[in-house]
Image: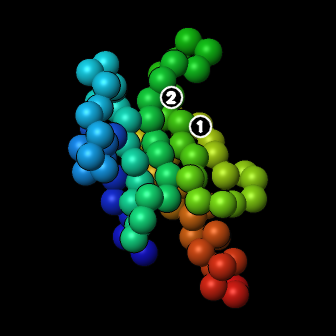
């Protein structure tokens, strides 16, 4: 499985929409064969954190908070892999 991170700005243009001018550069969609999630950075209790969530149907926990982009990517990929295994029959 190869997940691709694409800037949210780029995804909006691919989908034929004009992105808002104030959209953060630290905002990504996560794509496999289709859109599967999102990772973005924002303040959480005074610290900048990376938030991630799946956009495909998944049982909780299907979202989380990480200190680094790499940690967020790893967590989202692990969660998505569980979803794929479940839909493939295990």
Residue drawn 39% across the image and 60% down it = 31
- Up-down relation of residue 45 to residue 50 (above or below): above
Q: Position of residue 37 (x, y in %)?
A: 50, 52
Is 37 situated left or right of 19 in this image?
A: right
Q: Residue 31: which numbered mark, if any?
A: none
How crowded pointer 2 is (Cα within 10 Å; few <14, some 14-19, many 20+) is rated as some
- Residue 52 shows in the view: yes
Image coordinates of residue 86 in percent, x first then y, are 69, 77
**Residue at point 26%, 34% (across, down):** 18
Mark positioned earlier in the residue sequence (1 or 2): 2
Q: Residue at the location (29% across, 40% down)?
A: 17
Asked if 33 appears above or below 28 in the picture, the reply is below
Residue under label 1, please give it.
65
Rendered residue at 69%/85% (across/down): 90
Residue with the most extreme right position: 60
Observer-nearest of 54 and 11: 11
The single residue placed furthest to the top in the displayed view is: 46
Question: Position of 14 compared to 88: left or right?
Answer: left
Which residue sits furthest front?
A: 16
What distance separates the C-alpha of mark 1 from that of mark 2?
A: 7 Å
Other residues around mark 1 within 10 Å, as few (<14) / some (14–19) / many (≥20): some
Tell me if residue 75 can be seen: no
Coloring scheme used: rainbow
Judging from the image, what secondary structure is the residue with disc 1 in?
strand
The x, y position of residue 39, in whole percent, is 46, 42
Q: Are marks 1 and 2 in contact (CB under 8 Å)?
A: yes
Q: Does residue 48 appear left or right of residue 57 in this picture?
A: left
In the rendered image, residue 73, in percent from the top left (x then y), is placed at 45, 52
The N terminus sits in image quarter: bottom left
Rendered image: mark on residue 49 = 2
């Amino acid at each position: 499985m190869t997940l691709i991170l694409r800037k949210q700005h780029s995804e909006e243009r691919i989908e034929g929409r004009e992105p808002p001018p104030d959209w953060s550069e630290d905002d990504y969609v996560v794509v496999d064969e289709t859109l599967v999630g999102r990772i973005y950075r924002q303040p959480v209790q005074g610290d900048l954190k990376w938030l991630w969530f799946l956009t495909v149907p998944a049982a909780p926990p299907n979202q989380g908070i990480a200190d680094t982009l790499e940690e967020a990517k790893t967590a989202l990929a692990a969660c998505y892999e569980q979803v794929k295994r479940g839909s493939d029959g295990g």
